[in-house]
Image (spheres, helix red, strand yellow):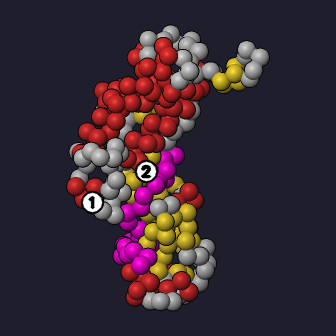
């Protein structure tokens, strides 16, 4: 099954003991009217929770295509087209293919050690590309890179599901029970922090403990290889634990 944004928002209000027309999330314009409604604020917090969970403790697998123009060494992951699942985004690439040929992953330091002129080393066609590496966490680089183009590179890795700020948007990247616990707890915490000047609300920031406990449980269930140094989840979501 899946949980919609509307269901998660209702759960957020429920654990805060607030009605669905709560004013906790309203951002005013100074004359008593709202420029941003509570529902919109909670929806944004839900989207933030989904993104953070997938970046810290859930291996949501994504693939897509990066297009390298002629004489282009690095391409940003934000340029990815035809992502699978649809409208997802990638934040950590793990494998790259040119056609059916799997490129060998290397670190930039190892590429540099093998070829001090690596940044200027080129080849005439894609069949001669041997390696790929992460120029940073948000781009893919080829070695050698190609003087002709465009060249399509299929990339696999970990990402974030489609997040559209709409009530009907549904999420199914973790079991429903965990989703109903963790995401509303995160949103409730953010609402409490937003209203820190209201002691009746600010005392409820303890919901963050519930959210972080859920993240650590998910993190410890990840394959050990994903949690090792250099892996996508090498840093525990809550430092000092696990």
Residue at the disc numbered 2 = 159
The residue that appears at 73% across and 16% down in the rendered structure is 33
How far is the residue under mark 2 from the one under mark 1?
Answer: 18 Å
Is label 2 or label 1 in front? Answer: 1
Q: Is residue 8 left or right of residue 73?
A: left
Residue extent of the magenta highlight: 83-109
Give the x, y percent position of residue 163: 51, 39
The residue that appears at 39% across and 58% down in the rendered structure is 157
Give the residue furthest to the right.
Answer: 31
Give the x, y percent position of residue 60: 37, 47
Residue at the disc numbered 1 = 228
Residue 139 on the magenta segment: no
Give the x, y percent position of residue 58: 34, 45
Q: Crowdedness of circle 1 by 10 Å Cα count: few (<14), some, many (20+)? A: few
Q: Secondary structure at mark 1?
A: loop
Image vertical order of residue 229 relative to residue 163, above or below: below
């Amino acid at each position: 099954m899946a949980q919609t944004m509307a269901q998660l928002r209702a759960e957020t209000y429920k654990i805060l003991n607030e009605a669905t027309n709560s004013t906790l999330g309203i951002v005013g314009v100074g004359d008593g009217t709202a420029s941003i409604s509570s529902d919109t604020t909670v929806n944004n917090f839900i989207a933030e929770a989904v993104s953070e969970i997938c970046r810290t403790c859930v291996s949501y697998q994504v693939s897509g295509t990066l297009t390298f123009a002629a004489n282009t060494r690095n391409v940003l992951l934000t340029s990815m087209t035809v992502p699978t699942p649809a409208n997802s985004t990638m934040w950590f690439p793990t494998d790259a293919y040119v056609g059916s040929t799997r490129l060998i992953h290397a670190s930039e330091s190892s590429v540099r050690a093998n070829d001090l002129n690596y940044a200027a080393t080129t080849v005439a066609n894609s069949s001669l590309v041997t390696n790929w590496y992460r120029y940073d966490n948000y781009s893919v680089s080829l070695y050698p890179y190609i003087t002709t183009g465009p060249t399509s590179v299929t990339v696999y890795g970990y990402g974030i599901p489609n997040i559209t700020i709409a009530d009907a948007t549904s999420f199914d990247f973790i079991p429903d029970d965990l989703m109903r616990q963790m995401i509303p707890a995160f949103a409730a915490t953010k609402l409490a922090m937003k209203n820190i000047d209201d002691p009746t609300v600010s005392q409820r920031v303890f919901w963050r403990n519930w959210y972080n406990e859920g993240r650590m449980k998910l993190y410890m269930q990840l394959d050990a290889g994903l949690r090792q140094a250099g892996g996508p989840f090498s840093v525990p979501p809550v430092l000092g634990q696990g």
